[in-house]
Image: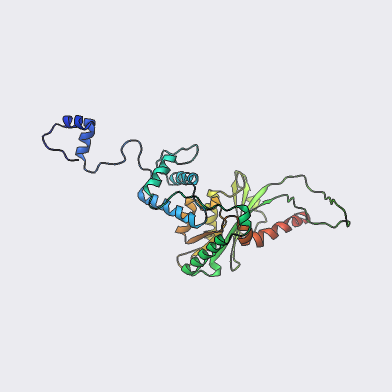
Amino acid sequence: MVFEEGKSKRREAELLEVPEATLRKRLKRDDVATSLGRYRATFTPEVEENLIEHIKKLDEMFYGMTLKKMRSTVYEYAERNNYTHHFNRETKMAGKHWVRDFMKRHADRISLRQPTSTSIARAMGFNRPQVNRFYDQLQTLQEKYKLEPCQIYNMDESGFTTVPNKAPKVLSSKGKRCVNKISSAERGTNVTVVCAMSALGNYVPPAFIFPRKRMKVELLDGAPANSIGLVTESGRMNTDLFLDWLNHFKYHVKPTDAYPVLLILDNYLAHTSLAAVKFCRQNNIHLLTIPPHSTHKMQPLDRCFFSPLKNIMPMSVKSGC
């Protein structure tokens, strides 16, 4: 602002239709702060740059970020890093206005796009473009980081009930239409098991997610050595537990700059949080997700480990093994 010496500040304020105090404040400072008043910038430009990179990374991983997911991710990041913010603590989301302004600030780098829909029928037909894209990315990562089979890991999780309801086949009279078998009326408890194995056959000790509020070490009696127990009310994986599991994975695999690893896993919401992607980037763990609706064909652990395990588990429980 240019102001001629000798002129009345009150008179100039009246001509400009601004408060005199505001005019005097601006005349005293050359670099007036843009974040005056209640609404201040929540994140620095560096943090917003990280958010943009996260959005682009999710797009490469076949998991496009919706506006709702964006609002949730921003709130989670602000809370986890103790940023002062005015986001809604009840919905645990950033405001729509914040996201709108964020999109405007970075309109030259990101945009809201309509993804190509993939119906279940089309996915069951084994979508060739998605599969080709997955293997192209796999080849790129292998060549870039010179990955050996011992550096490529597959991770999967599956739910098991403590009272299997799938009865094994039994012998019966030829032609009998209905074959009955006495079974337990107990419903059982669902427990999620998380496993990871390398292409060379090395395995990470499993993690068991129990539907509880507190963990008891007795629950791991008889589990494989170095297994860990985690708890949630639902007994399922979530964002926080995935970070706990990543620490478990890092401890046993020990990735370094000279020995990076690739982790192939499902395209699941809990696997794609900003905190998880950041942790992997800082610890030489490269993520590659399997295309949506393709795990029945492309998930090795699901096809070759969990499926046979679930078939034999009812017989093992019945025999008391």
Q: Is residue 220 above or below residue 234?
A: below
Asked if residue 11 can be seen in this view, the reply is yes
Tell me where residue 115 appears, x and y as whole percent.
51, 52
Residue at the image position 85 percent from the left and 58 percent from the top = 171
Q: Residue at x 78, y 47 (%)?
A: 184
- Depth order, front residue of 270/214: 270
Who is closer to the viewer here, 245 or 220?
245
Q: How is the image coloured?
A: rainbow
Give whichever of 68, 244 is nearer the camera.
Answer: 68
Q: Write the residue at 45% across / 48% down.
A: 112
Dividing the image into 4 quarters, which one contains the C terminus? Answer: bottom right
Instruction: Indicate left or right for 168 with 174 as reference.
Output: left
x and y, in percent, of residue 296 in the image: 64, 58
| Residue 206 visible (yes or no) | no
Q: Residue furthest left?
A: 6
Name the residue rendered at 86%, 56% in the picture: 172
Residue 78 vertical placement versus 142 (above, below): above
The residue nearer to you, when weighing 207 against 113, is 113
Q: Position of residue 54 (x, y in %)?
A: 45, 53
* Count of picture labels: 0
28 to 312, vertically: above or below: above
Q: Is residue 262 placed above or below 39 in the rendered structure? A: below
Q: Quadrant of the N terminus?
A: top left
What is the x, y in percent for residue 40? 35, 40
Left or right of 210? Residue 49 is left
